[in-house]
Amino acid sequence: MHTQVLVHEVTPEDLRYIVAAAVEELIIELLDHKSTPQSRSPELLTRAEAASLLRISIATLHRAVKSGQLVPNYVGRRVLFTHQALEAWIGICNGNSQGSAK
């Protein structure tokens, strides 16, 4: 399936990150199909899964991480997110003083 994506107001650094993240997600997806279903905790979401769940782009997710509002978990080079961290970030975005990305 081929889709067209128009990119506006993205720095070369962000574009490199977006492309690298997309390639990494595809590689991980291919490797996960070869491994057992228990190989990754269902509590942890990949960048693509987190962005899809939140209905935002991976670039927006990256900006939230870069700004320190959203704290990911690192497993090797993999960047994963907990549901709790995503909910805390939503609280921050909604101006909820109780929301914390920690």
Image (cartoon, helix red, strand yellow):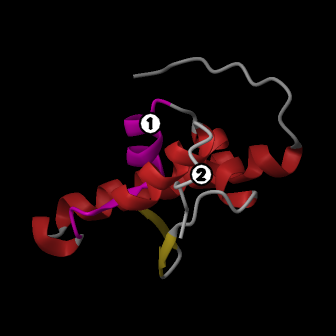
Can residue 12 be seen in this snapshot? yes
Q: Nearer the viewer, residue 39 or 102?
A: 102
Boundaries of the magenta span:
41-55
Q: Element under label 2?
A: loop
The residue that label 1 is drawn on is 54
Quadrant (top left/top right/bottom left/bottom right) for the N terminus: top left
Q: Nearer the viewer, residue 84 or 9?
A: 84
Amino acid type shown at disc 1: Leu
Amino acid type shown at disc 2: Ser
In the shown orientation, is residue 96 left or right of residue 6?
A: left
Q: Mark number for residue 97?
A: 2
Image height of 49 relative to 99, above or below:
above
Classify mark 2: residues with Cα within 10 Å, few (<14), some (14-19) or many (20+). few
In the shown orientation, is residue 66 left or right of residue 24?
A: right
Image height of 97 relative to 71, above or below:
above
Classify mark 1: residues with Cα within 10 Å, few (<14), some (14-19) or many (20+). few
The numbered mark, 1 or 2, whose residue comes first in the sequence reads: 1
Can residue 82 be seen in this snapshot? no
What residue is drawn where x is 22% and y is 69%? 41
